[in-house]
Image (tube, rainbow, N blue to C red):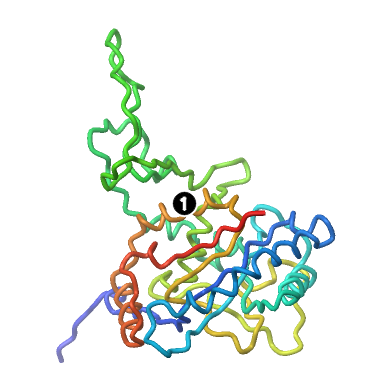
């Protein structure tokens, strides 16, 4: 009898997920949105409502003429940096504020689940997929990403630390953005900080995990992560955030949570964070099997899908 052996990883199946055409985030919800009796929350959705009317047109981009787009909406609650209220208090209040402006919320997610979901360290999972190109003409005096926790989009200004004694300092040279743009816009991003209570993941990294989750490209050992959970009819929302699933489906008739593209409506003060998100996602290496799977699904629907992950993200930054 012929017997052959093969590593389990070699035959591991990559799970597929359902896709909408567009995932629409109607805001991050923070503790300060509830500090004045919900008035700031109401103002938030009032500002969003006018822009949200353009969502169907955005969703039709790249679709065959006459095709009706599948659109899902979501919002994210900050239970990572600041715990406030409880799910059965906060979530219905957010739903009512949105409904007052004819906005329906399909899904709610907890920000803390983007750091860790069950036994999976999602933030570390994304860090492990980063492909950082060693900048040319550097001495290696700066610690690598895995030690320093900093990621840039180009070549930093050289450090003079460790120069031989009695030597003249090297002339200053500016940082340079990768890709040889005419004028550089250089960013240096802190991904985490190690504090007395342990590692604290930066907002920009968690937002990157959030975008990858919405785009349906995040996998752990081939399996999808943080898929939505639908509470059984009549089951109340829990009283503690830790008891709430990572993503909860609020609307029984909602289109799939993951989508080929995302659009995020948020206050303009978060623009620097999203610049960092785009920088991070520009250096993420999505597994080839996942990229191919998404591309084939999109092609089967006649959807023109950008090859680069960051080109699937759109934003509306809303001022006061």
Q: Is residue 319 above or below residue 152?
A: below
Write down the quadrant of residue 252 in the picture. bottom right
User: x and y percent of residue 147 in the render?
Assistant: 41, 41
Write down the quadrant of residue 300 in the picture. bottom left
- Work out which quarter of the rendered image holds the C terminus and state it: bottom right
User: x and y percent of residue 8 in the render?
Assistant: 31, 76
View extreme (top): residue: 166
Tell me the crowding category of disc 1: few under 14, some 14 to 19, or many 20 or more residues within 10 angstroms, Cα based.
Answer: few
Q: Is residue 242 above or below residue 106?
A: above
User: x and y percent of residue 172 in the render?
Assistant: 32, 22
The answer to whether residue 160 is left or right of residue 97 is left
The answer to whether residue 70 is left or right of residue 26 is left
Q: Is residue 57 above or below residue 133?
A: below
The answer to whether residue 295 is left or right of residue 49 is left
> Foreground residue, 211 or 261?
261
Q: Is residue 84 above or below residue 63?
A: above
> Foreground residue, 7 or 172?
172
Q: Quickly name the residue at label 1.
A: 275
* Number of numbered markers: 1
Residue drawn at x 57%, y 78% is 228
View extreme (right): residue: 37
- Work out which quarter of the rendered image holds the N terminus and state it: bottom left
User: x and y percent of residue 151 in the render?
Assistant: 40, 45
Dot 1: element = helix
Residue drawn at x 27%, y 11% is 167
Residue drawn at x 59%, y 53% is 268
């Amino acid at each position: 009898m012929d017997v052959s052996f093969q590593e389990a990883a070699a035959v591991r199946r990559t799970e597929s997920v359902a896709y909408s055409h567009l995932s629409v985030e109607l805001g991050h919800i923070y503790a300060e949105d509830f500090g004045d009796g919900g008035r700031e929350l109401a103002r938030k959705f009032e500002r969003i409502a006018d822009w949200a009317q353009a969502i169907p047109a955005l969703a039709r981009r790249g679709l065959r003429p006459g095709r009706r787009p599948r659109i899902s909406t979501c919002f994210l609650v900050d239970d990572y940096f600041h715990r406030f209220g409880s799910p059965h208090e906060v979530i219905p209040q957010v739903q009512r504020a949105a409904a007052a402006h004819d906005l329906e919320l399909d899904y709610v997610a907890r920000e803390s689940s983007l750091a860790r979901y069950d036994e999976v360290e999602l933030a570390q999972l994304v860090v492990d997929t980063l492909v950082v190109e060693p900048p040319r003409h550097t001495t290696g005096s700066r610690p690598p990403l895995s030690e320093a926790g900093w990621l840039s989009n180009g070549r930093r200004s050289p450090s003079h630390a460790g120069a031989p004694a009695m030597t003249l300092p090297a002339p200053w040279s500016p940082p340079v953005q990768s890709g040889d743009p005419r004028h550089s816009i250089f960013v240096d991003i802190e991904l985490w900080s190690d504090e007395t209570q342990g590692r604290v993941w930066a907002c920009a990294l968690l937002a990157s995990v959030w975008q990858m989750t919405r785009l349906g490209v995040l996998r752990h050992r081939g399996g999808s992560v943080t898929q939505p959970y639908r509470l059984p009819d009549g089951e109340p929302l829990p009283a503690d955030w830790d008891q709430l699933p990572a993503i909860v489906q609020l609307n029984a008739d909602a289109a799939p949570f993951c989508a080929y593209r995302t659009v995020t409506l948020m206050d303009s003060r978060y623009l620097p964070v999203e610049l960092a998100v785009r920088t991070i996602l520009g250096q993420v290496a999505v597994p080839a099997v996942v990229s191919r799977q998404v591309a084939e699904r999109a092609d089967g629907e006649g959807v023109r899908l950008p090859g680069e992950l960051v080109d699937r993200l759109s934003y509306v930054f809303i001022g006061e």
